[in-house]
Amino acid sequence: MMGLALCANDDKQLWSYSSIEKSIRGLQQSSVAFDKYSSSNVNLYGFHGGGNQQWLIVE
């Protein structure tokens, strides 16, 4: 399971949101994305673009 940590100015903590793919992916390693598992937990998983990796950013 993924947890939250204080920002350490580490490149591993930089993320990018694509409004086209609706994905949240790592800037350093774009092959991983936030993924909602069937248990409703959110974790990192290899990017495949499925519905469980699509997020809507609401401002």
Image: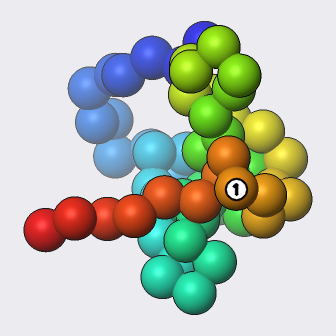
Crowd around label 1: few <14 · some 14–19 · many ≥20 (10 Å): few
Horizontal arrangement in the rendering, residue 32 relative to residue 13 (left or right):
right
For residue 33, above or below residue 38 = below
Q: Where is residue 24 in the image (x, y as percent from the top left)?
A: 54, 59
Horizontal arrangement in the rendering, residue 49 relative to residue 52 (left or right):
right
Task: Point out the image quarter for the C terminus.
Answer: bottom left
> According to the image, what is the colour scheme of the structure?
rainbow
The outermost residue toward the left is: 59
Q: Where is residue 39 in the image (x, y as percent from the top left)?
A: 65, 14
Work out whether residue 4 or residue 41 is closer to the camera in this orientation and state it.
Answer: 41
- Quarter holding residue 23: bottom right
Horizontal arrangement in the rendering, residue 6 relative to residue 10 (left or right):
left
For residue 43, above or below residue 12 = above
Query: Is residue 43 at all visible to an observer of this figure?
Result: yes
Q: How many numbered circles are shown?
A: 1
Task: Point out the image quarter for the N terminus.
Answer: top right
Q: Which residue is drawn at 56% across and 19% down?
A: 41
The amino acid marked with disc number 1 is Gly
Work out whether residue 32 or residue 54 is closer to the camera in this orientation and state it.
Answer: 54
Q: Which residue is drawn at 48% across and 82% down?
A: 19
- Quarter holding residue 54: bottom right
Q: Position of residue 40 (x, y in %)?
A: 56, 21
Work out whether residue 13 or residue 37 is closer to the camera in this orientation and state it.
Answer: 37
Residue designated by label 1:
51
Query: Is residue 29 at all visible to an observer of this figure?
Result: no
For residue 5, above or below residue 52 = above
Q: Residue at x 45, y 17 (%)?
A: 3
Q: Where is residue 34 in the image (x, y as percent from the top left)?
A: 60, 44
The outermost residue toward the bottom is: 20
- Quarter holding residue 49: bottom right
Q: What element carries label 1?
A: helix
